[in-house]
């Protein structure tokens, strides 16, 4: 643990911001995941759920077509997808079945773009930083993802003691707006000035 803290303190502002903003986003997404799974179980048949899972796995088949995408473009795409996700979430209050299918299709694009961003991010960091910094960051990021998941789902348990599903979805939408603000801050602070190769 001490080594992780020491490594975190040794990172520059860009790397520290990626860890902190990523932690908040992990916790926020934890709010909606159990709700979506519960709705799928209530409204979908096993066949539909299987189709959804196949679609999610198929996303990986399209990733190679985006080889060479610059981290800046991939991050910008994530922000655009989050805007669409917030808009699509309003469908929950209109028709939960339509919301589930819309969420599913957006999730496919999230899967594709997240992998593309991850690969582009690794390439960028390996190129800009030394090998040891990259390795240290990956361990910190793994720890962050674990804490974000555990903390986020623990918060969900507490929230569902006081809020119903309808109220929880409202809270998720509110927090997603906050995530978008953090991502915009992150983009304009760190990504906007990145140089993109002409080939990208």
Image (cartoon, rainbow, N blue to C red):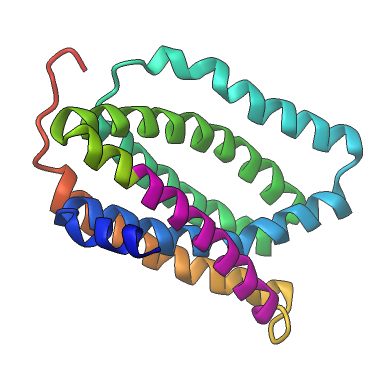
Q: Where residue 128 sits: x, y (%)?
A: 14, 33
Query: Which quadrant is home to the N terminus?
Result: bottom left
Q: Where residue 169 sits: x, y (%)?
A: 62, 68
Question: Does residue 186 appear to the left or right of 99 in the view shown?
Answer: left
Quarter where residue 67 is shown: top left
Q: Residue furthest front?
A: 2
**Looking at the magenta stretch, what is its main secondary structure?**
helix
Question: Does residue 137 appear to the left or right of 124 in the view shown?
Answer: right
Question: Does residue 102 appear to the left or right of 70 in the view shown?
Answer: right
Instruction: Give the total number of marks visible in the rendering.
Output: 0
Q: Where residue 133 sits: x, y (%)?
A: 23, 42
Q: Nearer the viewer, residue 18 or 162?
A: 18
Q: Which residue does the image show at 29% across and 17% down from the upper left?
A: 68
Residue 72 visible? The answer is: no
Q: Which residue does the image show at 62% across and 45% down from the upper left?
A: 103
**Looking at the picture, does residue 145 appear above or below residue 117?**
below
**Looking at the picture, does residue 80 appear above or below residue 130?**
below
Q: Which residue does the image show at 51% across and 50% down from the upper left?
A: 85
Q: Nearer the viewer, residue 133 or 65?
A: 133
Quarter where residue 160 is shown: bottom right
Q: Which residue does the image show at 55% across and 74% down from the upper left?
A: 171
**Looking at the picture, does residue 110 appear above or below residue 188?**
above
Question: Does residue 40 appear to the left or right of 139 in the view shown?
Answer: right
Residue 98 visible? The answer is: yes
Query: Which quadrant is home to the C terminus?
Result: top left
Q: Which residues are magenta?
A: 138-159
């Amino acid at each position: 643990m001490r080594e992780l803290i020491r490594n975190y303190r040794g990172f520059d502002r860009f790397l520290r911001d990626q860890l902190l903003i990523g932690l908040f986003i992990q916790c926020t997404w934890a709010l909606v995941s159990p709700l979506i799974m519960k709705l799928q179980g209530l409204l979908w048949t096993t066949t539909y759920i299987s189709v959804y899972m196949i679609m999610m796995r198929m996303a990986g088949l399209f990733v190679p077509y985006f080889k060479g995408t610059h981290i800046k473009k991939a991050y910008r795409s994530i922000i655009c997808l989050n805007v669409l996700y917030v808009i699509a979430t309003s469908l929950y209050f209109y028709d939960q079945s339509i919301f589930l299918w819309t969420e599913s299709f957006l999730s496919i694009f999230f899967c594709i773009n997240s992998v593309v961003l991850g690969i582009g991010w690794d390439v960028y960091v390996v190129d800009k930083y030394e090998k040891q910094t990259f390795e240290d960051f990956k361990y910190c990021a793994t720890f962050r993802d674990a804490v974000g998941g555990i903390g986020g789902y623990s918060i969900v348990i507490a929230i569902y003691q006081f809020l119903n599903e309808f109220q929880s979805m409202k809270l998720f939408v509110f927090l997603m707006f906050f995530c978008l603000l953090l991502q915009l801050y992150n983009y304009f602070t760190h990504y906007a000035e990145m140089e993109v190769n002409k080939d990208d």
